Amino acid sequence: MTDNVEQNTAEQEVPAQATQEASNDLTINDLNAMKVIIDIASSRGAFKPNEYAAVGQTYTKLTAFLDQVAKQAETAKTGA
């Protein structure tokens, strides 16, 4: 009986681990959300003046990456 309980517990843990690993995926939508969050936070004055450079550099990199992904997606759609 103990073996059966241990086996059932192990079987229940595997799907939970698989679900957790899948939820750790970072998507383009997540990156777009991060860009919006930075926009909102900066408009509300959430950053100190000495943090502007780091926030701006990160925002610029994120924007460039998202623009590149959008161009690649458009190219893939048109087949050119």
Image (cartoon, helix red, strand yellow):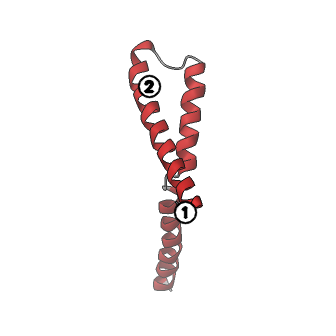
Looking at the rendered structure, which numbered label has been put on residue 56?
2
Who is closer to the viewer here, 12 or 49?
49
**Residue at 39% from the left image edge and 21% from the top image edge:** 53
Of badges 1 and 2, nearer the viewer stands 1
Q: In this view, does 33 lie to the left or right of 51?
A: right
The residue that appears at 44% across and 25% down in the rendered structure is 56
CA separation in Å, label 1 and label 2: 34 Å
Q: In the rendered image, which residue does mark 1 sit on?
A: 79
Residue type of the residue flagged with mark 2: Gly
Task: State whether residue 66 is above or below residue 27.
Answer: above
Q: Which amino acid does label 1 sit on?
A: Gly
Nearer-the-camera pick, 22 or 59: 59
Horizontal and vertical percent position of residue 38: 54, 30
Please say if 15 is above or below 25. Answer: below
The residue closer to the viewer here, 19 or 32, is 32
Number of marks in picture: 2
Q: What secondary structure is marked by label 2?
A: helix
How packed mark 2 is, by other alpha carbons closer than 10 Å (few <14, some 14-19, many 20 or more), is few
Q: Residue at 47%, 31% (x, y): give it.
A: 59
